[in-house]
Image (spheres, rainbow, N blue to C red):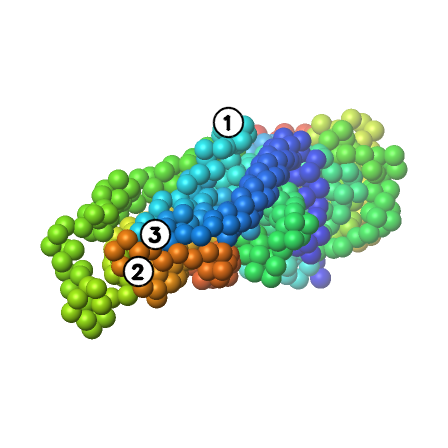
């Protein structure tokens, strides 16, 4: 069964077609990078997968569950990391993890929370610190821990490397690989061509709401990818 | 799950210094106000008991005299503070605390606590119920806004909605958090303090405990509605600034403006005559000195009652005439004063009905009724004191009428008769006896609770990231 099966989804806002006939399939453990400039429809696509907005047409099935007709059940199988993982600044990393895991229907105790945070790469000394003092990278790690706690089948990342320093971005790549290794499908919406090249299995270029190209990441080099990207956007 | 979520939301709220500080400030003010009024009531009740004992000694020790003169010498009756007066003094500050019980007159009550207000009261330091009904909405709206608006602006609401949980659970946990925080800080300490205070003072009987529970339930219901409105409005408004403006406007409208408008409308719809005009009407219907024609009619009535044709055949004609006049005044007092009090009660009922327009009015009316400090309870004391006065005067007159006395003859009696008159005791009426006046307020509170629930459900249904 596919982790994610998107079939011809379209959505328009006041006559503007934000996403137009997008189809996409992700197998368990597959990492897919959806590339595109601002306004290409990447975040709208994620919003439709999350059930925040309903597509005008088409279908989205997550791990066998129709995300349009049963958004809650679909969300139970999905973890979502926005561009900036927002945490409650007055809660510690452990408390934030407990809170968001609870919202996902999972009750976790403190030892389990510590293990998940460690798996996500957050240093132990930060586990009991309030999240208000966390860097973006540290918040990302807590976000990943939340996704792990949820035991999701699909991980959605919206511009995950934006604003991260090289070390933090590398850490995130490791975490994505680890998630993939656990059989979690990962869909990244990003315009960071080079970083995703290292971690993604497949790449798709989204332009004006349409998927204009799709490649196996192993078959294309970084320079070719940049040229292809610019060509597709210019077309 | 909702309780664990609420627990974490409470941790978030507790660590927000502004919201938590505002809650603590109001909670402290409520406790301080309770302690100030409770201390004053204890002192006042002790004074009343001491003076009442001295009054009793004065009555019994008044020496030998004509029983009707004794009825004029008479006694003061003191009104004990309602058990929950320290929580909600209601109309207590503005009504008298003692009444002079004498023959021929149903006197006005004297010594309003307002006249002896403490320094805190003089500078406008309100009672716990007034602070709760007036200012709790502001604080509750503030913490509801803090929990929701920050969540939305920070983006944590979006993350939360991306989880598998139903939005109803998120909204419910937030409303429950606001309710728990406000009830836990604004209501529980003052309720527990009051129970402790009453228990230590030996005034915690079953009825008082029941009143205490009902009072806490009234306020807790009020808080539940406010929490629901605070959360629903914060969620529905397009941005935090609009939400704060709307909530601030609701507070002014419900808690400050409407109670004043309602009071004015009640006065206009059910105006009360001045106390002077009521006294004048009584003086005309039951004059101190009768006309010759009325005297002749009174005499004819007495002759008929005794079945005689001459005044000389009545054992004690003076006393019999005084008794006749006294009983006539009872009918006058019942009609004129009873009518006046009935109009005050009608005002209270109409004000309570305005509770359907403002939850603050509903909470105010229900609170005073449960605390036993509304006008219905005060009237019960007035009626009780008046029954005692009539019984006392009738006993004195009956003793006189039972002994022959003509011309300059006078029948006298002494402490044997005076001590047969039982001491005045006022048992606090049980909860529920006067709930009728505030019934519209209780119904309104229930209606507001239902509205609050609907608002929450609608807000959850329309919740978007």
* Label 1 chain ID: B
Q: Position of residue B349 (x, y in %)?
A: 35, 53
Q: Position of residue B139 (x, y in %)?
A: 55, 37
Does dot 1 land on a helix, a strand or a loop? loop
Q: Quadrant of the N terminus of chain B?
A: bottom right
Q: Nearer the viewer, mark 2 or mark 3?
A: 2
Q: In this rendering, would B159 be left or right of B451?
A: right
Residue located at (66% from left, 39% from top): B13
Of mark 2 and mark 1, the one earlier in the sequence is: 1
Of mark 1 and mark 3, the one earlier in the sequence is: 3
Q: Nearer the viewer, mark 2 or mark 1?
A: 2
Q: Position of residue A218 (x, y in %)?
A: 79, 41
Figure quadrant of residue B207? bottom right
Does dot 2 land on a helix, a strand or a loop? loop
The residue furthest front is B408
* Label 3 chain ID: B
Q: In this rendering, would B411 be left or right of B81?
A: left
Q: Quadrant of the C terminus of chain B?
A: top right
Residue toward you, B105 or A209: B105
Separation of marks 1 and 3 at Cα, in angstroms: 40 Å
**Residue identified by numbered label 3:** B103
Residue toward you, A41 or A222: A41
Q: Is residue A163 above or below residue B255?
A: above
**Residue identified by numbered label 2:** B405
Separation of marks 2 and 1 at Cα, in angstroms: 59 Å
Q: Position of residue B441 (x, y in %)?
A: 41, 54
Q: Is residue B424 above or below residue B237?
A: below
Residue located at (77% from left, 38% from top): A92
Q: Nearer the viewer, mark 1 or mark 3?
A: 3
Residue located at (11% from left, 54% from top): B293
- Which of the numbered marks, if any, corresponds to residue B123? 1
């Amino acid at each position: 069964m596919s982790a994610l099966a998107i079939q011809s989804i379209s959505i328009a806002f006041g006559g503007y077609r934000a996403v137009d006939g997008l189809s996409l399939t992700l197998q368990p453990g597959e990492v897919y990078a959806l590339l595109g400039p601002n306004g290409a429809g990447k975040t709208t696509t994620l919003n439709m997968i999350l059930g925040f907005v309903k597509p005008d047409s088409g279908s989205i099935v997550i791990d066998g569950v129709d995300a349009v007709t049963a958004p809650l059940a679909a969300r139970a199988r999905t973890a979502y990391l926005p561009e900036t993982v927002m945490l409650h600044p007055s809660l510690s990393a452990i408390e934030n993890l407990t809170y968001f895991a609870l919202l996902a229907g999972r009750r976790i105790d403190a030892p389990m929370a510590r293990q998940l945070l460690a798996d996500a790469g957050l240093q132990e000394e930060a586990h009991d610190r309030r999240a208000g003092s966390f860097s973006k990278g540290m918040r990302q790690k807590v976000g990943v821990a939340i996704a792990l706690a949820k035991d999701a089948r699909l991980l959605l990342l919206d511009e995950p490397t934006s604003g991260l320093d090289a070390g933090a971005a590398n850490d995130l790549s490791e975490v994505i690989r680890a998630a993939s290794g656990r059989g979690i499908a990962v869909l990244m919406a990003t315009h960071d061509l080079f970083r995703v090249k290292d971690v993604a299995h497949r790449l798709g270029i989204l332009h004006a709401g349409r998927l204009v190209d799709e490649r196996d990441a192993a078959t294309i080099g970084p320079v070719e990818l940049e040229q292809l990207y610019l060509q597709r956007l210019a077309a | 799950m909702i309780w664990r979520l609420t627990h974490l939301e409470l941790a978030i709220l507790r660590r927000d210094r502004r919201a938590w500080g505002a809650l603590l400030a109001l909670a402290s003010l409520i406790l301080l106000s309770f302690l100030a009024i409770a201390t004053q009531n204890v002192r006042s009740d002790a004074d009343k008991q001491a003076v009442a004992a001295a009054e009793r000694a004065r009555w019994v020790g008044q020496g030998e005299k004509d029983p009707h003169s004794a009825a004029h010498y008479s006694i003061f009756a003191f009104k004990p503070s309602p058990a929950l007066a320290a929580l909600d003094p209601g109309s207590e500050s503005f009504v008298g605390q003692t009444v002079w019980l004498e023959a021929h007159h149903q006197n006005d009550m004297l010594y309003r606590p307002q006249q002896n207000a403490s320094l805190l009261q003089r500078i406008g330091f309100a009672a716990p119920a007034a602070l709760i009904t007036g200012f709790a909405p502001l604080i509750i709206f503030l913490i509801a806004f803090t929990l929701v608006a920050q969540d939305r602006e920070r983006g944590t609401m979006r993350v939360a909605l991306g989880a598998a949980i139903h939005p109803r659970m998120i909204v419910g946990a937030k409303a429950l958090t606001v309710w728990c925080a406000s009830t836990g800080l604004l209501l529980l300490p003052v309720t527990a303090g009051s129970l402790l205070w009453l228990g230590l003072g030996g005034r915690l009987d079953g009825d008082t405990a029941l009143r205490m529970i009902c009072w806490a339930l009234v306020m807790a219901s009020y808080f539940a509605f406010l929490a629901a409105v605070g959360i629903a409005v914060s969620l529905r408004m397009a941005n935090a600034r609009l939400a704060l403006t709307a909530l601030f406007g609701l507070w002014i409208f419900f808690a400050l403006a409407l109670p004043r408008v309602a009071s004015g409308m009640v006065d206009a719809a059910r105006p009360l005559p001045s106390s002077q005009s009521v006294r004048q009407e009584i003086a005309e219907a039951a004059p101190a000195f009768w006309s010759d024609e009325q005297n002749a009619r009174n005499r004819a009535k007495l002759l008929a009652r005794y079945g005689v044709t001459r005044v000389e055949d009545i054992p004690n004609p003076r006393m019999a005439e005084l008794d006749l006049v006294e009983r006539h005044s009872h009918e006058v007092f019942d009609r004129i004063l009873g009518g006046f009090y009935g109009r005050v009660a009608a005002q209270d009922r109409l004000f309570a009905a305005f509770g359907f327009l403002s939850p603050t009015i509903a909470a105010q009316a229900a609170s005073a009724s449960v605390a036993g400090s509304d006008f219905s309870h005060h009237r019960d004391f007035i009626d009780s004191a008046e029954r005692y006065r009539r019984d006392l005067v009738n006993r004195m007159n009956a003793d006189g009428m039972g002994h022959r006395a003509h011309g300059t003859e006078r029948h006298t009696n002494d402490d044997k008769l005076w001590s047969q008159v039982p001491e005045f005791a006022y048992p606090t009426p049980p909860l529920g006896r006067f709930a009728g006046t505030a019934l519209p307020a209780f119904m309104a509170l229930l209606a507001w609770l239902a509205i609050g629930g609907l608002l929450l459900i609608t807000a959850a249904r329309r919740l978007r990231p």
